[in-house]
Amino acid sequence: MIRKMGCGWRLRRLMAEQGMFQTSELVPLLAERGVQLSREQVYRLVTQEPQRLSMDTLAALCDILQCTPNDLIEIRVVDRQVPKAACETSPAPPPQVRRSVIRRPEQP
C-alpha cells in the first residue's frame, strides 16, 4: 500500500476566530498587500481546499490573520489504498477452459 498525503485547509476557521464571517472582507485586505483576487476567487479560496496557492497569497493571508502557514494548512495521511500503476498489478487470470466438440463434415 502506498501512503497518500492530504491537506486540511483552515482558512474559514481562522477567519471566524478573527471575527471575519464574510469572504468579501478579505478582498480589500488582500489588495492592500498586493494580491488582486476577485470576490469569486476569494470565495473559492475560503470555501474550498486550494490545489495550488501562490506564496504571495499565502504570505498575505498569514499577515492578515496573524498566523503561520502551519496554522492554515494541516498535513495528514489519508488512510486509503492508492491503485498501483498497470505494470505493477498481478497478471490477469488465465481464461476459462471450455470443452469443444469437433465434428467432421459429412461425406456425400
Image: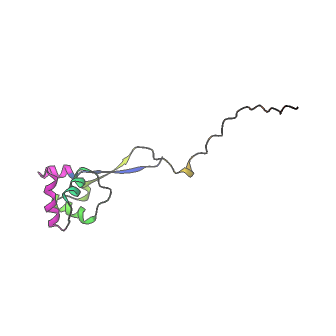
Residue at x 23%, y 57% (from the top left corner): 41
Residue at x 61%, y 43% (from the top left corner): 92
Question: In x, y percent, where is residue 35?
Answer: 20, 65
- Displayed quadrant of residue 38: bottom left
Whether 92 is drawn above or below 62: the answer is above
Q: What stretch is highlighted in magenta?
A: 12-34
Q: Residue furthest left?
A: 19
Main secondary structure type of the part rendered in magenta: helix
Q: Nearer the viewer, residue 90 or 45?
A: 45
Q: Residue furthest front?
A: 108
Q: In which quarter of the image is the C terminus?
A: top right
Question: In x, y percent, where is residue 74?
Answer: 29, 52
Whether 99 is drawn above or below 90: the answer is above
Residue at x 52%, y 51% (from the top left corner): 85
Question: In x, y percent, where is residue 44?
Answer: 24, 53
Magenta residue check for 18: yes
